């Protein structure tokens, strides 16, 4: 290809796409999409493509499935990425012009597009996007950090397996959807929780973790039932 672009398209609010992303989409001849099941999210992405890259060709890259049952998580992800690299390389080699991979949120945060393209030695440009953490803080009208403080960005799995990390006062938790905050319910914490942040279905709850955890659990269960999937992100903050 003449050029490859990795475009952050925001966390779900169509208004949160940047001018840089709109300009990059307008230049794209080929949009590479991954063969995921159609969901509200894929439909939302398709709507952005229709609006900002109406003439681009959509090329579906067929990916290997990840072994989610594997006990060695890092190893399973490594193998899956190797399989992906081969199929992406094939798709890129088969096309000319400007190609684009679209990434929800920002490509720098819990996304493997950059890692896979590095693995195949591709040249590419990254267009940053508004991440779900940015959107969460805006929705709750909070700053991510406290004055001169630090924040650890982590996953639901790590919180479930490792508990509250020693010495930390703020955690931003992603890739959960299963209530990993339950594992730290006895700590003196506040939670700022959001699901489908930025989208029409957005759900927000906040308060002392011990007091709102039941409501968040029930909200997750209801939302999962209604939509068939959930994506949530939250900030846990030690009370002073
Ligand atoms: C594979 S990561 C992608 C993160 C993305 N690159 C970003 O910048 O936000 C997927 C996780 O991001 C979070 N996420 C992404 N979009 C979200 C949204 N609109 N509402 C809530 N959480 C979201 C969830 O924690 C989800 O499990």
Image (tube, helix red, strand yellow):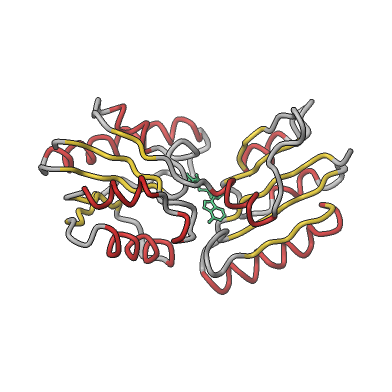
Q: In which quadrant is the N terminus drawn?
A: top left
Q: In which quadrant is the C terminus drawn?
A: top right
Which residue occupies the foreground of this view, 137 or 43?
137
Residue lying at the far front of the rendered structure: 19
Q: Residue at x 24, y 29 (%)?
A: 122
Image coordinates of residue 159 in percent, x first then y, are 68, 39
Q: Residue at x 60, y 59 (%)?
A: 195
Which residue occupies the foreground of this view, 16 or 64?
16
Tell me which corner region of the image, top left, top right, bottom left or bottom right, holds residue 129. top left
Q: Quick check: 140 left or right of 127?
A: right
Q: Residue at x 23, y 38 (%)?
A: 4
Which residue occupies the foreground of this view, 49 or 193?
49
Q: Quick check: 177 left or right of 108?
A: right
What is the tally of numbered marks visible in this picture? Answer: 0
202 w.r.t. 26: above or below: below
Which residue occupies the foreground of this view, 147 or 64?
147
Image coordinates of residue 46 in percent, x first then y, are 32, 63
Q: Quick check: 223 left or right of 219?
A: left
Image coordinates of residue 117 in percent, x first then y, are 29, 32
233 w.r.t. 212: above or below: above
């Amino acid at each position: 290809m003449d050029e490859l672009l990795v475009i952050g398209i925001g966390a779900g609010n169509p208004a949160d796409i940047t001018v840089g992303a709109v300009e990059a989409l307008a230049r794209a001849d080929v949009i590479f999409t991954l063969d995921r099941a159609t969901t509200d999210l894929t439909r939302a992405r398709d709507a952005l493509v229709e609006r900002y890259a109406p003439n681009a060709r959509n090329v579906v890259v067929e990916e290997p499935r990840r072994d989610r049952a594997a006990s060695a998580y890092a190893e399973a992800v490594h193998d899956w990425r190797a399989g992906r690299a081969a199929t992406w390389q094939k798709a890129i080699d088969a096309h000319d012009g400007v190609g684009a991979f679209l990434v929800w949120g920002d490509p720098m945060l819990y996304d493997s597009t950059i890692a896979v393209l590095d693995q195949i030695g591709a040249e590419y440009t990254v267009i940053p996007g508004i991440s779900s953490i940015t959107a969460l803080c805006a929705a709750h009208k909070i700053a991510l950090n406290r004055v001169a403080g630090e924040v650890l960005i982590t996953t639901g799995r790590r919180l479930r397996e490792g508990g509250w990390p020693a010495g930390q006062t703020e955690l931003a938790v992603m890739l959960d959807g299963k209530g990993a905050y339950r594992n730290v319910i006895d700590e003196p914490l506040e939670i700022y929780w959001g699901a489908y942040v930025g989208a029409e279905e957005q759900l927000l709850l906040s308060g002392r973790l011990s007091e709102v955890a039941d409501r968040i659990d029930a909200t997750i269960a209801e939302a999962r039932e209604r939509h068939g999937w959930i994506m949530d992100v939250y900030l846990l903050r030690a009370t002073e």
